[in-house]
Image (cartoon, grey):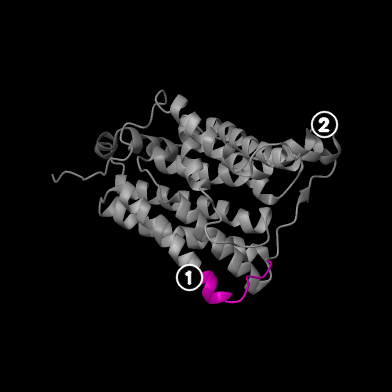
Amino acid sequence: MDALLDATLRLAAPLLLAALGELIVERAGVVNVGIEGMMLCGAFAAFAASVVSGHPAVGVCAGVAAACAMGALFAVFAVLRRADQIVVGTAINLLALGATGLGLRAMFPDAAPAAPTVSEWRVPGLADLPLLGPSLFHQTPFTYAALVLAALCAAFLARTRAGLRLRAVGDAARAADAEGVLVQRVRVVAVLAGASLAGLAGAALPLAQSNGFTEGMTAGRGFIALAIVIFGRWSAFGVTAAALFFGAATAFQFRLQARGLDVPYPLALALPYVVTLAVLAVAGGRARAPEDLGRPYRRESK
């Protein structure tokens, strides 16, 4: 049980980070389908920078910066130029897949080396607690960051004036504009913040869950993050619970394979994605999205 909980938290951390970023973006009224590509760029930049520098902290910064750059590109077309958000996001995903594959071959033509990884942090005293202590308080910094950021995101959206403006832009952009809120600016900042969290989520993959990079290593985690936001009903606590649920599904898949049960490997591998589709089918129709989600905003001339 301890091993399953430990694996759940480790696997849920990048999903939660990416989903929190998408939550901020969608509460501002923007659908960022390009989160998968931003995570992939963050993963590659974190891997390459950590290999070159020898320090995983440099890799984390590089991963966030690379994803933020992709977020800026998305914001220019989807927010400022009011292009179709789904089309722009899809283009970002294709660009990231091609660019990271090309970059991997250009930097490491023979074989990609192992990257330095982020060490686990053990909280003195708390890690010795019976039952949950070893699992909850002996994790990588990405897990702690994800849980802390979830609490901060909940407080930001519910308790701050900036969070109120963000939610107003997503629910009624024209009314928010009439009250003096700069809709475009809020949406651009939200996209950049969401992209930064996606980059942090991507950096967790090569620096905490493995010590290397492979093409397309995000393997649909960005799309699962989109499903988590819907399943979590656009709330930070709901998103946290949903991310833990998907992390548990992935951990359970690995446990099935480790136990040597007579389950076909492709079927076990598909389990998290089957769960994603099932959750969307059940919860998607009942969830209430922000009213102006996905609608480009054009300010009327006075």
Q: Which mark identifies residue 102?
A: 1
Tell whether position 131 is magenta.
Answer: no
- Image location of residue 227, percent across then percent down: 47, 37
- Image location of residue 28, percent across then percent down: 38, 40
The answer to whether mark 2 and mark 1 are in CB contact below 8 A is no
Q: Nearer the viewer, residue 54 or 11?
A: 11
The structure residue drawn at horizontal position 25% and vertical position 54%, both measured from the top left corner, is 81
Span highlighted in magenta in the image = 102-114
Of the 4 image quadrants, the one containing the N terminus is: top right
The structure residue drawn at horizontal position 79% and vertical position 45%, both measured from the top left corner, is 123
Q: Which mark identifies residue 131?
A: 2
- The answer to which quarter of the image holds residue 202 is bottom right
- The answer to which quarter of the image holds residue 69 is bottom left
Q: Residues within 10 Å of mark 2 (few under 14, many from 20)?
A: few
Q: Is residue 93 above or below residue 143?
A: below
Q: Is residue 105 above or below residue 187?
A: below
The structure residue drawn at horizontal position 33% and vertical position 53%, both measured from the top left corner, is 88
Q: Nearer the viewer, residue 257 or 262?
A: 262
- Image location of residue 94, percent across then percent down: 40, 58
Q: Residues within 10 Å of mark 1 (few under 14, many from 20)?
A: some
Name the amino acid type tagged 1.
Answer: Leu
- C-alpha span from label 2 to label 1: 46 Å
Tell whether position 105 is magenta.
Answer: yes
